[in-house]
Image (tube, rainbow, N blue to C red):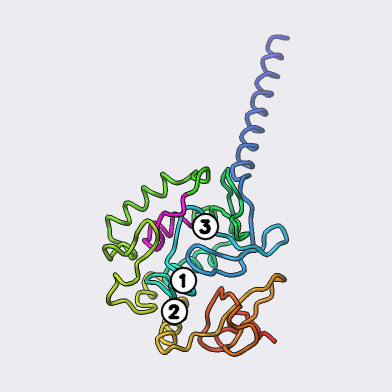
Amino acid sequence: MKIWLILLCSFVFLTLAGCTIGQSSKSTKNANRVSVKVLSVMDGDTIKVKYKGEIKKVRYLLVDAPEMYHKKLGEQPFGREAQTRNREILNNAKDVALEFDVGDKEDKYGRLLAYVYADGKSVQEQLIREGLVRVGYIYKPNTKYLDTFKKIQEKAKNEKKDIWKYEGYVTDRGFVKSVVKDWRPGKDSTKGLSTKTTNQSQNNSTSSNNGMCKIKGNINSKGKKLYHLPGMNNYDAVKAEQMFCTEEEAQKAGFTKAS
C-alpha cells in the first residue's frame, strides 16, 4: 500500500513539475522583446516610438531602405513604397515589439538599434521578402539574424522584386538613383496596399509630382506632432519624419501647426 502511495505521489509531482516548466517556457519565450508604442514611421527602416517612457528613434538592424527625405539624395526609387508598407504593417499590428542584439543598443546618433516585430512577426523579414529593403549596415556582433535575412533576400533578388528590378540599382553602399531611368515619385506605391493606403499614396504622389509636398511633419521630444510650413522659423533645421502636401493632410494625420 505504501509503495503505491509513493508511486502515486511521484506521478503527481512529476506531472505538476512538467506543467510548471511548460508554462515557464511559454511565458519567457519572448522575454527578450519589449513592447513599444509607434509614434511615426519615418521611412522603410526608421521609426519613432515611445520606449520606457522616452521618445526614441529606432533604426532597423541589418537592413537599409531607399531614402525618402535625404538632404543630398532626396527621394529614391521605392523609398515611398518601403515607407508606406512599413507604416501599413505597424499600423495594422496590435503589438509592436523590439528585440536587441548582443552588441550596442544605440548608434552614434542616439537611435535604438533593434529587430522590430509586429504581432510576433519580423518586420525586417517582411520588407526583405517583398523587395523593399536590402540587407546592409552589418556591424558585428549585431548579426543574430544575418544568415536568415540573406536567404530571404536571395529569393527576392532572384524573383526581381521591386528594388531588384533594376540591375545596378542596389549596391553594397546603397542605391543608385540614376540607374532607374523611368522612375518618378510614388510610381509603384499602390501595389499590394489596402484601399485606404492606396488612395493616400496616390494623393501624395500626385501632389509630390506637382512639387507641393513641402510641409514637414515632426514629433518633438515631448511626443507632440507638429507640422512646419516653408518660410516658418527654423523650417530648414527641422528634420522631417513625414512630408505632407497640404495642411489638411497634416491635420488628418494628427499634426498641429507649429507656432
Residue at image location 60% in from the left, 66% down from the top: 48
Which residue is situated farthest in the front direction here? 72
Rounded to the nearest angstrom, the CA distance separating label 3 from label 2 is 23 Å
For the residue marked with disc 1, what is the amino acid? Thr
SS at mark 1? helix
For image coordinates 37% across by 65% down, the residue present is 175
Camera-side residue of 182 and 37: 182
Does label 3 or label 2 sit earlier along the sequence? Answer: 3
Q: Quadrant of the N terminus?
A: top right
Location of mark 3 (residue): 60
10 Å crowding of disc 3: few (<14), some (14-19), many (20+):
many
Residue at the spot of label 1: 84
Q: Earlier in the sequence, mark 1 or mark 2?
A: 1
Q: Residues within 10 Å of mark 1 (few under 14, many from 20)?
A: many
Q: Secondary structure at mark 3?
A: strand
Q: Are marks 3 and 2 in contact (CB under 8 Å)?
A: no
Q: Secondary structure at mark 2?
A: helix
Residue 143's spot in the image, x, y percent?
A: 49, 45
**Disc 1 versus disc 3: distance between alpha carbons?**
16 Å
Rounded to the nearest angstrom, the CA distance separating label 1 from label 2 is 8 Å
Query: Which label belongs to residue 201?
Result: 2
The picture places residue 219, in percent across and down from the top left corner, at 64, 74
- Give left or right: position of 139 versus 58: left
Residue bounds of the magenta highlight: 123-138
Q: Nearer the viewer, mark 1 or mark 3?
A: 3
Q: Position of residue 103 (x, y in %)?
A: 58, 45
Identity of the amino acid at label 2?
A: Ser
Which residue lies at the image location 58% right of the left edge and 74% below the top edge?
239
Rendered image quadrant of residue 5: top right
**Contact flag, marks 1 and 2 (Cβ < 8 Å):** yes
**Of residues 62 and 233, which is closer to you in this image?**
233
- Using residue 61 as the reference point, say whether residue 225 is left or right of it: right
